[in-house]
Amino acid sequence: MTDYADIARLLSDRPTDAVSLDWLKKAHDTQLTLCTALEEIADSLPASVNRQKCIYAAKSLIPLVNGVHRYEEEALFPLLESKGAGDPELTVSIARLKFEHVEDECFAEELTDTLTRLGSGDDTVNAEAAGYMLRGFFESIRRHIAFEQQFMLRGGLAA
């Protein structure tokens, strides 16, 4: 699993003056790695929870999700909008992605609380509900990333 320092480094290396599809691919790969860790946590419930993995995921989730979303909304989406001005499908797709960003960020906050509680050994956490939350989140993130990758390729941003 990517460590917390790798995520901090990724976010600090975020381009500020241009769109970098290389950086976005690294960010997507890091998000997918975190999704794999979340799936492993879900699979371990209720009896074999790796508390350290829960704490790591709790510390990583919000900075990673929010950092990638800010980059997309501040750099990538404006570039797409300028390239495809007047394309109604593009406008709808970007609005969809922005809405999903809001949903994902709210969900990440709730999930961070649950992961922190799992990591601290709180035995009042409902394992079934936690597993459902984890699976809902990582499946949503995976779908979102797949759509973005397809969308950007179709949008002509990839070489």
Image (cartoon, helix red, strand yellow):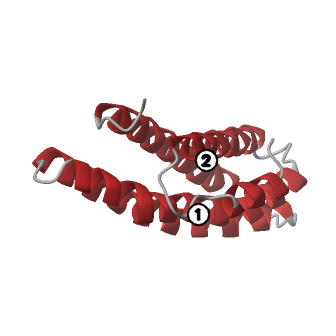
Task: Label 2, secondary structure: give it.
Answer: helix
The residue wearing badge 2 is 27
The number of discs equals 2
Neighbor class of circle 2 (other Cα within 10 Å; few <14, some 14-19, many 20+) is many
The residue wearing badge 1 is 67
Farthest residue to the front: give it: 17
Place of residue 106 in the rendered image (x, y in percent of width and height, measured from the top left) = 50, 69
User: Which residue is located at x 47 percent, y 41 percent?
Assistant: 145
Which one is nearer the viewer's eye here, 28 or 130?
Answer: 28
Task: Label 1, secondary structure: give it.
Answer: helix
Among the 4 quarters of the image, the one containing residue 81: bottom left
Which one is nearer the viewer's eye here, 114 or 86?
Answer: 86
**Label 1–label 2 contact, CB within 8 A:** yes
Query: Distance from label 1 to label 2 (Cα)?
Result: 9 Å
User: Which residue is located at x 43 percent, y 29 percent?
Assistant: 159
Which three-letter amino acid code belongs to the residue tagged 1?
A: Gly
Which three-letter amino acid code belongs to the residue tagged 2?
A: Ala
Image-based side of 30 in relation to 152, left or right: right
Question: Between disc 1 and disc 2, whose residue precedes?
Answer: 2
User: Which residue is located at x 19 percent, y 54 percent?
Assistant: 91
Place of residue 65 in the rendered image (x, y in percent of width and height, measured from the top left) = 58, 59
Place of residue 60 in the rendered image (x, y in percent of width and height, measured from the top left) = 73, 60
